[in-house]
Image (spheres, helix red, strand yellow):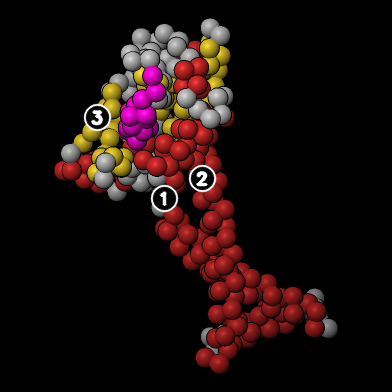
Amino acid sequence: MFNKPGKGVSNAKLLITYTVIGALVGLVILHPLTISVLWLESSATATDRTAYLDFMQNRLWLGFVPRRLFMGSVYLVIGGFLGAGFGILTRSLITRVRELQFFSSVIGNSIPETIAAGEGSQAEFKSSVRWDIDNDCTNKALEKVIAKTIAGFLNNRGGNLLVGVSDNGTILGLENDYRTLRHKNRDGFERLIVDIIRKTLGGDLCPLVHFSFAVIDGKDVCMLIVEPAARAVYLEDGGQSKFFIRSGNSTRQLDVREAMEFAQNRWS
């Protein structure tokens, strides 16, 4: 399983490290290289090794004279910017690798195989998003159940939420949910989920939830692939902020003390 967000090298430390290394490279390597180019362009005795070494020694020592410190500072700054840029690129690559590790581990099984494996710490089945099967009507209160499950996955190690599947793995499909939407198709269903996340959990978390659809027994099923969040995620419900985690094959709400302890250990 890939590393949890918050573990490993932090963004700030990585950026500072590369900036410092870049500054040193600018001073120790770029500066002497520039002086060497000037020597080659201006000296009539470019092949005279002794003259070159004397020239380099004199020019480099001048860099420590107070009135000549400006040039050394310029190369420090240039090297620092190059190092910072390389650090940002490296961090981006690290993030991408972690995303690929996440998807290779979580999406390793197809939707039918995930259903066959049953519910667990990283898999949850829901019959619908807003269609009340018992009362045969729309019930938007059920949307909070979906939001709660997504929050639990975000706060823990991520996982898969399959919609259109009963607890025992029976395929129910999304057609009832489709009927409640303005756009009665997969696109409308995806927009509904994104809107639920944005309103109850936070718009910045939407990119962490990915959609995969499949037709099983002639019915649409959706799998929400939820990545772990890099911050604590709270569900806004009736003016209250609630904290949920995935525990075993269920989603559990933590009280204030438990939430603080969990967050400290999870994102420290």
Q: Nearest the camera: 4 or 173? A: 173
Q: Which mark is residue 195?
A: none
Instruction: Residue at 41% x, 38% y: name it.
Output: 197
Q: Which of disc 3 and disc 2 is earlier in sequence? A: 2
141 in the magenta segment: yes
Say which residue label 2 marks. Answer: 94
Say which residue label 3 marks. Answer: 252
The image quarter in which residue 46 lies: bottom right
Foreground tag (2 vs 3): 3
As shown in the figure, which amino acid type bears the numbered disc 2? Ile
Q: CA distance from mark 1 to mark 3?
A: 30 Å
> Magenta region: which residues?
137-152
Q: CA distance from mark 2 to mark 3?
A: 31 Å
Say which residue label 1 marks. Answer: 9
Q: CA distance from mark 2 to mark 1?
A: 10 Å
Does residue 83 appear in this view?
A: yes
Instruction: Residue at 68% x, 83% y: name it.
Output: 55
Marker count (numbered) = 3
Q: Position of residue 142 (x, y in %)?
A: 34, 26
147 in the magenta segment: yes
Q: Which of disc 3 and disc 1 is earlier in sequence? A: 1
Check disc 3: other Cα within 10 Å, few if <14, some if 14-19, many if 20+.
Answer: some
Kind of element beneath mark 3: strand
